[in-house]
Each structure stands twice: as C-alpha cells, then as structure tokens.
Amino acid sequence: MDPLRTLLTQALDDDTLTAEHRRAAFDRFLVALSAGHLRTAANHDGTWRVDPLVKRAILLGFRLGRLTTFPNAGPLSFADKDTYALQPLPLIERNIRIVPGGSAVRAGAYVGHNVTIMPPAYINVGAYVDDDTMIDSHALVGSCAQVGKRCHISAAAQLGGVLEPIGTLPVIIEDDVFVGGNCGIYEGTLVRQGAVLASGTILTRGTTLFDNVHGRSYRATPDGTLEVPPYAVVVPGSRALPGPFAQSHQLHTYAPIIVKYRDARTDRSTALEEALR
C-alpha cells in the first residue's frame, strides 16, 4: 500500500494515535489532495468509483480542525476550521486565471492547468477541476464534485456537494461538457462526455430524464446515480400531471428532456468558451 494511504488508515483507525499524529497525517493528505495526487472519485474504464479512504480523511479534517479566524481578507473577517483555509494556488505554474472579484478555492480542492475562474465562484474541498475548464461567475463546485477537461460551468450553475454517505458518488461532469447558466446538478448525478445542459436544467437523484430522440427514459440506478448519456443535449421541459384535478387546472411538472445529440451546430454554439479564453 502507498505510504500515505497506510498513514491515513492508521490515523483513521488506530485509537492509540495522539491528536498530533493524526493532524500530521491529515496535513500530508491535504497537500496530496490539493495537488491532485489523490481524488475522491476516479474513472476506471468508464466506471466511476469512489475512494472511501479519501472521503473519510476529508471528514477527519473537520473533526481535527479548530475554529479560527482569518483576518487577512481586507475589510472582511471569517471564521472556519483551521484545517480548511483557502489555499494559495500555483497560478503561474499552472497558468490559472482567477479574475479579481471574490472567488475562493478551499484547501483540498484541485484546480488544473489553464483553468479560468470568474468572480465570484467557489470551489469546495475534495473537488477536482481538470485542465482547460472555465468556472464562471457565481458558480459553485461543491465538495468532492469532479469536473473534467475543457468544460464550461456557466454563471450561477451549481454542482452540489456530496460527502456522505462515504460510498456515494459525487457529482461528476466528464470532459467537454457544457453546463448552462442557472443549472443545478445534485446528488451524485453523472454527466457523460460532451453533453450539453441548457440553462435552467435541474438534475437530481429523483429526476427522470426523458430521451425524446430514442424514446426512453433514464432514472437513478440502485446506487443513486442519474446518468446523462454522452453528447446528449438536455433542455428543461414539462409533462402533464395525471388526474382530473391536474387536468382541469392544466398542471405540469418539471421534466428534463434530451432533444438531440450533439452535432457540429451545437459545437459552434459552445465555441464562446474558446473566445473568452
């Protein structure tokens, strides 16, 4: 076993260790997590798997942390666990652009090369943002969310955080995905490569996704994961509610719909990302 994983296992499971030893192990873990050497979930030949040890170690940091103030923030002041301060990113080394205006990246999050972060955006602990991705204004990359290469997470989009239960997949956005403004992706939803989510699309574990192209529907699997197919173009829609009361009042409920699969025209519509870069 990797020496760091061995050290973490001891810190989590050995009740004889002192708090100082646990904290030393956690500090080493946080450096590795922030550098992208460890991550909460990884793709193994198309199947995403959670690393329970990483999630347990993140939770250990909340238990070990002491409440402290962070006074060096201009006229503002903050208080949080000292284990999860905001991290200083290697901006020049990775060619990361963080435009001034109030964005923050918490310790334990990884931000890759050539990433652009527009203000104000927030990237939480355990998140992984891969190379050449844009995180736009007011966007949230929640705890443990995984974002692939060349993605665009548009203004006010929310990628929900998933820490517990330990074995639950986080929100996963694969390579080349376009997430439109005001989208909400929650509860371990998996958006496959090249998909496009139109503005206002909401996806959760309880959401049914309707594929109007192939005449089928997608629901969460037994492990709680709703999966958006590769290159699907999803728009917010509605469907009529059954029953005489709903019919008499013309009531509808929200329903995301796959209206097409990505083609050259869709690719051109997402080329704005390259222009902004």
Image (cartoon, helix red, strand yellow):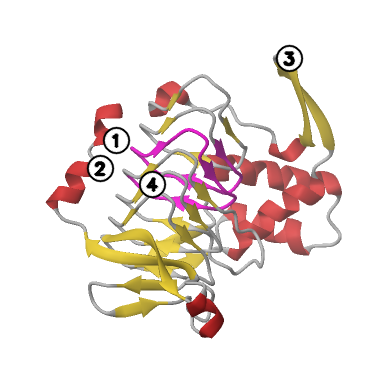
Q: Which residue is more in the foreground, 46 or 160?
A: 160
**Can you name the residue that lies furthest to the left here?**
264
Which residue is labeled 2 in the image? 270
Q: Amino acid at mark 3?
A: Pro
Marks 1 and 2, how far apart in space? 6 Å
Q: Mark 1 belongs to which amino acid?
A: Glu
Circle nearer the viewer, 3 or 2: 2
Say which mark, if any, is on residue 101: none
Q: Nearer the viewer, residue 37 or 198?
A: 198
Residue 275 on image: x %, y %: 25, 29
Quick check: 173 above or below 77?
below
- 219 and 127: which is toward the camera: 219
Residue carrying label 1? 273
Give the distance between the C-alpha atoms of the residues marked 1 and 3, in whole angstroms: 34 Å
State the separation of the CA atoms marked 4 and 2.
10 Å
- According to the picture, the residue beneath numbered tag 3 turns out to be 75
Predominant SS along the magenta part: loop
* Left or right, residue 150 beside residue 55: left
Left or right, 124 with reference to 159: right
Graded by Cα atoms within 10 Å as few (under 14), some (14 to 19) or many (20 or more), the crowding at tag 2 reads some
| Magenta segment boundaries in residue numbering | 122-149
Q: Earlier in the sequence, mark 4 or mark 3?
A: 3
Sequence-first tag of 1 and 3: 3
At which x and y percent is residue 77? 77, 23
Residue assigned mark 4: 180
